[in-house]
Image (cartoon, rainbow, N blue to C red):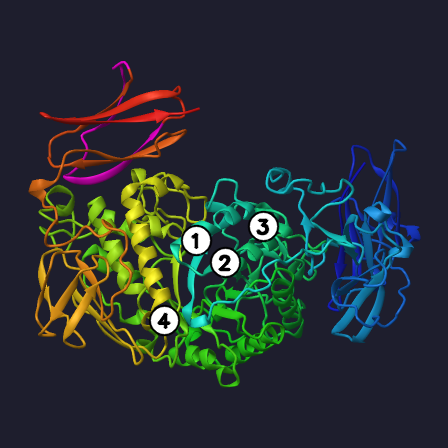
Amino acid sequence: PMLFQLNRQENANDQVATVSAGIFGTENITSISFSINDVEQDGIAFLDTVNSVFRYDLPSPVAAGSKFKISATDAMGRTVSDSVGVVPPPVVDEPLPPGIRDGITYSDADPAEVTLSLLAPRKSFVYVIGEFNNWELDPDYLMKRDSINADSVRWWLTLPPVTPGQEYAFQYLVDGEIRVADPYSYKILDEGNDPFIGDVYPNLKPYPTATSQIVSVFQTNQSPYNWEATDYVRPQQHELVIYEMLVRDWVEDHSFASIIDSLDYFENLGVNALQLMPVSEFDGNVSWGYNPAFHLALDKYYGPPDKLKELVDEAHKRNMAVILDVVYNHATGQSPLVRLYNTSATGSPGSAPSPDNPWVNVTAKHPFNVFNDINHESTFTKTWLDRANEYWLTEFNVDGFRFDLSKGFTQFDSGGDVGLWSAYDASRIAILERMADRIWDVDSTAYITMEHFGSEQEEIELALYKTDQGFPGMLFWENVNNDFSEGTMGYPSNFADAYFGNKNHPGPSIISFMESHDEQWIMYKNLAFGACSNAPLGGSTCDTDPGAYSTREFNVAFDRMKMAGAFLFTIPGPKMMWQFGELGYGYGPDGRECLRPGDGSLGDCPAGTPDRIDPKPIRWEYNSDPLRLKLKNAWSAILRLRKEYEVFRRADTGVVMDTGNPGKVMHLDSPFGMDAVIVGNFAVTPMQVDPNFLRTGVWYDFFSGDSIDVQDPNALLDLLPGEFHIYTSEKTFTPEPGLITVSNEDQPTASDRSFGIHSVHPNPVRAVLSYMLDVDTDEAVNVSLYDLVGRKLMAIEKGVGRPGSSVYSLDTSNLPAGVYFLRAESGVMFDSKSFVVVR
């Protein structure tokens, strides 16, 4: 005979009221015995022989998780048995000892002592199982119960002495069925994902063989990290220049260690804060991190905890802040917050939360939710969230947080109405202010940044919260991607929203950015959709007959990115850039550096483009491309100017922005020193712009170092398309020459473009080589690869599209080490460049 689908059906009080099982065999079933909590009785009378189903309604319901065992014997004398659940043991009621917190508590006095505490009301019993008891039920590991009331029950246990300094894996077995890790875990083991990360997390404890589901790890007597940056000065909030980054897509080894190695790069660029996309444990290994399962555990895919601490420490030595992107709007089904109370008897990660879940809503309260919506009015959630924030601030010394989807921190049910959800919500304000209070109790100057996009009134109220008491207030993301990308492409645009004063904020409480992880790269938009002089409204003409000027040309697109940086980074108030934006990331070889929509479609991206959250090509070769380096160095020079002169940072700088027309002008009027005027032509044809200088006299052109004597503040300036200037009323440092190539003296036209191959890099090369092809003809262009003795190895490109500049790549991984040549030919014109392959 065969037994399957042993089932215990619960009543409205979460008690077992009925037990059942399917019983099949080739011979008739002759006898059945079954037991509930080891009380055995005959069961043949309860077998439905037609459907082969055993069903028994208990005269008196028993506790959830109660043990149900059944044995069936057939006419051949063969017997099979199966069971589920555990006999509910007698539970000891005892108050939680002083000083014990939810999760793992280590003893300061005894390195062999650890106490575990699990907040889990409406459960009948909980065992601790782990390698210390061979993952078996042991009376010595039955947790005690502390019942303050029916909705506040903690299960706790001080374990028998453990070996100091040794890691132990453990779980809770709740009601005999739910194997679950601790919601406050600092480290977890994951059978499905840990085997692939040995290179970045050496000597990782292996997943145990005698259990299933994710397990927690504790370790007493850990060696504390030796912090060295004792004289660190946190950047003032209004002076932040944030570099948002995804550890996974920075270097191939996706490690904190590689970011430590890159800190000089960030410092030289001129940013003063790193913002790491979520690094708490998320489902799987390869992710953006917005699918969190264990909010207090560091995701091991990026390396061990001490490496993140070292990253923070080394950043602080450079007076550079580290901000964590955290995700408290939701949790995946792997989270103990969901598994402890879901619709599966065993807490299956794929099951929906049950109505009695104290942390998670059954139905999301807003239209943008993903996974399981967390109830931020729950006392359980408040305690858990405060602990998480405290942990990251104190254990890792981070400087603050960016709260993902903070507008979702509400129990007001807006259904599918985005407008209703975005409207002023007093309950959400109360939730966020309470959270801020607890954060500032731990660190009074910690940054609190919101991805909010709510009503202006709500954001201003939160921005001002407790600023009159010396606290920093909250910061809000301000997305000006569309404004700036429309401008760089050559279309109508207005940059006014990038300045906090134009948003009615009384202080610098918005973080303006033209690129982020959620927005399309501006370079992609420039090269794919930009305007041109023959078609100012864009379209296919800009591919076939662009005229004298096209923002789709590679070098032109870079010039316009420099101009965009001149307008964004000089505006007072916090600013942010997105990973590799300083190198003009976007489009790339074959146009596949493109961010796809979140609906799974290609959107405007070509076939073969990675999915939205999939790994993107890592292009460190861009850092050796002379054209891209000019963009990086131009932005770096602007950021240095911002750092050294307060007019670009102070909240009391008078800012007047006339940026609604193609000829854009911005005035920065300082009450205490140097003033500045920024002008730029965002059109695709030459134009005259009224700079409206703040005064007559000598003004200095930042990038050229030249001076002009202004007699008439309104004398028109002749600006070529893409030409811009930062004028200052005092002499400043002069950046390296050659960064800005657009001026009335040297602007290239269609008639003087050169035909040839440029920007061959990296050189020498081990893998992928990039090169730029300048074309001044509509005729077909052939590009071929030759070896050192002149043998033609392959034809690489044929029929290259349109006049202008395009970037291509060549995979050299199959070429032997040696010297090679790229040769481009079109009619009577040709050019060649050499490169070296190394192995």
Q: Are the residues flagged by discs 3 and 1 in contact, CB closer than 8 Å?
A: no
As measured in the structure, the alpha-carbon distance from the residue carrying label 4 to the one carrying label 2 is: 19 Å
**Mark 2 or 3, nearer chain start:** 3
Residue closest to the eye, 411 or 326 = 326
Q: Which residue is mark 2?
A: 318
Q: Which is in the foreground here, disc 3 or disc 4?
A: 4
Determine whether 839 is above or below 470 in the image: above
Which of discs 2 and 3 lies nearer the camera? The answer is 2
Please say if 216 is above or below 58: above
The residue labelled by disc 1 is 266
Amino acid residing under circle 4: Arg
Label 4: few (<14), some (14–19) or many (≥20) C-alpha neighbours in 10 Å: many
Q: At numbered mark 4, what does the secondary structure look like: helix, strand or loop? A: loop
Prevailing secondary structure class for the magenta stretch in the rendered image: strand
Q: Nearer the viewer, residue 815 or 670?
A: 670
- Residue 283 is marked as 3
Q: Is residue 479 visible?
A: no
Q: In 3D space, how far apart are the residues under numbered discs 1 and 4 (Cα atoms)?
A: 19 Å
Residue 163, horizontal then vertical, whole percent? 85, 50
Q: Amino acid at mark 3?
A: Asp
Q: Mark 1 or 4 closer to N-term?
A: 1
**Is there a contact, CB below 8 Å, between mark 1 and mark 2?**
yes
Q: Which residue is mark 4?
A: 649
The amino acid marked with disc number 2 is Arg
